[in-house]
Amino acid sequence: MRDDLLDPRAVLLHESAADRDAAVRRCGRALVEIGAVAESYVEAMLERERTISTYVGEGVAIPHGTAAAKEDVERDAICVVRFPGGVDWDGEQVTLCVGIAAKGNGHIPLLAELAEILLDPDRARTLREATEVSQILKELT
Amino acid sequence: MAGIDSKDIRKIIVACDAGMGSSVMLASQLKKQLKNTGVTVEHTPVDSIPADADIVVCHSGLAARARAAAPDKPLVPFQIFLGDPAVTKLVDAIKNGGTVDA
């Protein structure tokens, strides 16, 4: 896997958000801050979330942009943003967001690994309760 | 479409909007579950479902667009990205034989 796919600077484990949109914006900003996407990508993430929720189970959502917003992506990148207080996600409780920016396929192995983790309740809990960046990197890469 | 015999499924398309998130996750799971069955799994945007697809799997929120784009293809809509009963049934039918409601 490419080293810059999951930049440790984009792993934020002690965030809070008032609602789903605020949480998605926080993820988008993390991707903007590491130079992975243009500012306009954040709006596309919100748009996508309103169309179909990216909640994938086990308290995890994977916000990302729309097909049209791929032109706002500079490079494939992932951010991990944890909300220990939880965020109401259309009735589901989300504590971990894995935000995605992708125009290629570089992130697919990481998503495949995430799927494996989410199908194993113990590993999913470890990921949700991680308080160190190193734990997240170890689980996902 | 009333259904499709699982023997006739050679290629599954996971249709999605952006093709960078949840559908990618589902496609990777399906690929793993159907390893050694000879069935191909690909993900494509909902508007460009290939002609050689035997069955289309997509989120229920995209089902109308998928039907419009590929009206002749059997469609399995799902609600949950991981562990949806409709997808589990599809995998079971391919592995053990049977008809898939689609």
Image: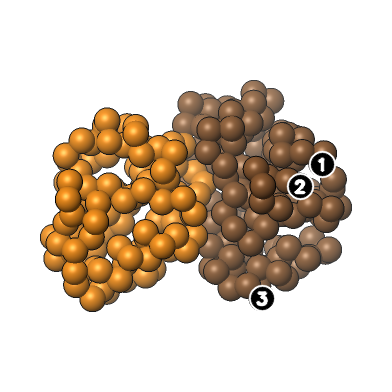
Chain colours: A brown, B orange
Residue B88 spot, x, y in % from top left: 37, 66
Tags 3 and 2 both on a single chain = yes
Q: Nearer the viewer, mark 3 or mark 2?
A: 2
In this view, B41 is above or below B63: below
Q: Which residue is mark 2?
A: A87
Q: Which mark is residue A17?
A: 1
Residue B55 spot, x, y in % from top left: 23, 51
Task: Indicate the amino acid at tag 1.
Answer: Ala
Residue B15 visible, this angle: yes
In this view, B58 is above or below A36: below
Q: Which mark is residue B97?
A: none
Residue A20 spot, x, y in % from top left: 71, 39
Mark 3, chain letter? A
Q: Which residue is mark 3?
A: A122
Mark 1, chain letter? A
Badge 2 marks a residue whose secondary structure is strand
